[in-house]
Amino acid sequence: MIELKNITKSFNGKEVLKNISAVFEQGKINLVIGASGHGKSVLMRTMVGLIRVDKGDILYDNRILDFENYEKLKEIRRDIGMLFQSSALFNSSNVEENVEFPLKMFTNMTKEERLARVNFCLKSVHLENVNKKFPAEISGGMKKRVGIARAIALDIKYLFCDEPNSGLDPITSRVIDELIKEITEKFKITTVINTHDMKTVLDIGENIIFIYKGEKWWNGTNEMVRNTENKELKDFINASLV
Amino acid sequence: MSFFFHFGRYLLFLKSMFSKPEKTNVFIKRIFAEMVAIGIGSLPIVILVSVFQGAVTTIQTAYQLITPLIPKPTIGTVVSDSTILELAPTITSLVLAGKIGSHIASEIGTMRINEEIDALEVMGINSSSFLGLPKIISGMVMVPVLVIISIFLSEAGGIVAGQLSGALTADEFIQGARMTFKLFTLQFSLIKAFTYGFIITSVSCFHGYYTFGGALEVGESSTKAVVYSSVLILLSDYLLAELLL
């Protein structure tokens, strides 16, 4: 479980996140939704420790994300996997090396063990026979899948996905959504997804947080989103579904 | 104010690098890979510059010392001393600042804009140390090696040019070179190379690491890395000469 307590963040005097408190539950798909420029990405980058908060606490199963103590920060980060918007694969390494990288860095596995784990992770994201291909040689959807495979290479507890469907066609988007859902259930991890894709929200969202102008505007379940009376959220949903 | 901001940031960047590597064997492998990239990768340009540098210096020195009052081996002395003391370390390092510096800054800058550095951080890896430290260590080892090669090739270029132009024979050149040779001159040259190796790699890593934006900014970082490295090389050249000679 991830808990946010009164998170505040400003850039050049402009408050981007305003006193946000929220709970992201384990084994569920937690969605952060909202229009572009309203603070979704900043919130996610803050949660993984890439941006320092001005005020407030972030707790990972009651362990505080301590920005002052880099070693403790790294300890928590080792339980985190993240799928970036751009996939952020290492362009000079092939698929196998990308997925193998965290294993090389943080385990004492032999080459054979690492390879077996790489193949298991690639199989989990329904990718096979692409081990030797470089990121430039595979499609956007495949890159996202490799990104997920790399994120789950270690036994992670928390999975963050920043706009996992951006730049993908509707069919591939659904495949990625289903994959994230499958992985969340299979590994019983806490998944947090940043998105403004309403199809994702309606298909796989379980705990949904709507961010509006840097504030937590609304929080509820998938069913509640469909029947919301919140004006801003309704506007956002209607605009997204047009 | 901007100078102090960037200088402070540079010092903090260096400080953040010096932490225990996540995996020692991966770290050592990266050092060797960087040594190959910096050392072997720069060898062709160093060979080319050094040979011509020695040859031209010999011909121009001979042209200026065209008087029977000055013995011919003096040309060898002048060329050899100036090569060891100044030309090989400084000119080679300025060339390397262009080649290695722009490569490092654009490599790390591209990783930054592609979120690869963020990915490393989220995995719990100290990205500045993982990316920068192997390059800095390799630079500090390989630039002196390249400078030694440059000294050797410059002298060789000088000998060949002297012989071909008829300015002086190989024996006269070597005699002149040995006449005033001091071990400290070579040591000083290597101290310079070591310092320049650190400057080129650390300044370039810094500019690459703090790239924000897109492809245009990567180009800007690359240019800044070369310009600042070159300026700092010239500045430290003066300071080292003032302090150690």
Image (cartoon, coloured by chain):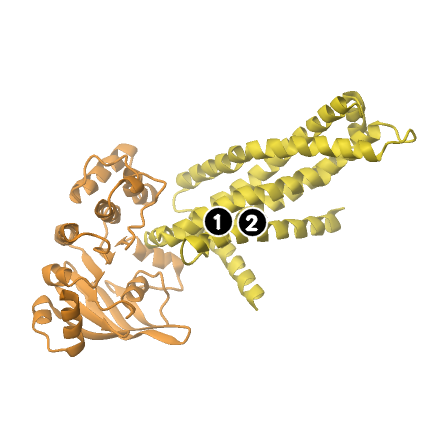
Image quadrant occupied by the N terminus of chain A: bottom left
Chain that is coloured orange in the picture? A
Q: Position of residue B72 (x, y in %)?
A: 84, 27
SS state under label 1: helix
Q: Colour of chain B?
A: yellow
Q: Residue at x 28, y 50 (%)?
A: A87
In the image, taking residue B126 as reference, residue A148 lies left or right, namely left
- Residue A6, by quadrant, is bottom left
Q: Nearer the viewer, residue A100 or A203?
A: A203
Expressed as whole percent of the image width and height from the top left, the position of residue A15 reads 35, 75
> Of the residues shown, which amino acid type is indicated by label 1?
Ala
List the residue tagged with mark 2: B226
Is residue A182 rendered to the left or right of residue B74?
Answer: left
Dots 1 and 2: beta carbons under 8 Å? yes
Whether residue B203 is visible to the viewer of this picture, yes or no, is no
- Mark 1 residue crowding within 10 angstroms, few (<14) / some (14–19) / many (20+): many
In the rendered image, the quadrant that contains the C terminus of chain A is bottom left
Numbered tag placed on residue B105 in the rendering: 1
- Give B37 or B136, whichever is nearer the viewer: B37
Q: Residues within 10 Å of mark 2 (few under 14, many from 20)?
A: many
Q: On the image, which quarter does residue B96 sit in?
A: top right
Discs 1 and 2 share one subunit: yes
Nearest to the observer: residue B190 or residue B19? B190
**The furthest residue to the front:** A242
B26 relative position to A191: left or right? right
x then y, percent, for residue B105? 48, 49
Lower sequence index among marks 1 and 2: 1
Q: Which mark is residue A104?
A: none
How far apart are labels 1 and 2 at the CA level?
9 Å
Helix or strand or loop: what does disc 2 sit on?
helix
> Label 2 sits on what residue type?
Val
Q: Please name the residue shown 72% across and 33% down the image.
A: B56
